[in-house]
């Protein structure tokens, strides 16, 4: 094809010939934008759910709510034993 035949074929096109391709392009653009926002939202929530966070933000079990639910479900309530943290470096080190 040369430049002359391309210009002749472009002159034959009418605006109504661009309606369906224009609608399809708009549809694909909208789908791509929604897809990108959805993947960003999902990845941020997965990262937040799997992150350990800082020690101040460590989730703990609310024993009052757990005891209430255990009582309603007739479950035995085995309270976890509290562990005391000792400084092992201070107790195992000997002066030289």
Image (spheres, rainbow, N blue to C red):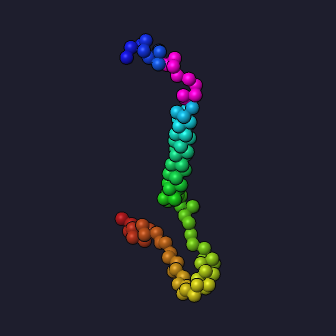
Quarter of the image containing the C terminus?
bottom left
Identify the image quadrant of the N terminus. Answer: top left
Which of these two is toward me, 12 or 31?
12
> Does residue 70 lie above or below 86 as drawn?
below
Classified by dominant secondary structure, the portion drawn in magenta counts as: helix
Q: Which residues are magenta?
A: 10-18
Identify the residue shown where x is 54% and y is 28%.
17
Q: Nearer the viewer, residue 24 or 32?
A: 24
Residue 53, percent across and down? 52, 58
Q: Which corner quadrant of the image does residue 65 belong to?
A: bottom right
- Residue at 39% across, 70% down: 92
* Nearer to the camera, 89 or 25: 25
Residue 29, quarter of the rendered image: top right
Is 8 in the magenta?
no
- x, y percentage for residue 86? 47, 72
Q: Residue furthest front?
A: 12
| Residue 82 rendering spot, x and y as whole percentages | 52, 78
Residue at 55% in and 45% down: 34
Query: Which residue is located at x 54 percent, y 87 percent?
Result: 76
Q: Nearer the viewer, residue 87 or 9?
A: 9
Please provide percent x and percent y for residue 58.
54, 64
Relative height, residue 80 to residue 59 (above, below):
below
């Amino acid at each position: 094809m040369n430049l002359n035949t391309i210009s002749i074929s472009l002159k034959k096109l009418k605006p109504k010939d661009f309606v369906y391709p224009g609608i399809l392009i708009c549809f694909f653009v909208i789908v791509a934008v929604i897809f990108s926002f959805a993947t960003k939202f999902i990845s941020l929530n997965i990262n937040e759910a799997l992150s350990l966070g800082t020690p101040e933000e460590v989730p703990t079990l609310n024993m009052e709510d757990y005891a209430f639910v255990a009582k309603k479900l007739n479950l035995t309530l085995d309270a976890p034993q509290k562990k005391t943290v000792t400084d092992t470096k201070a107790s195992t080190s000997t002066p030289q």
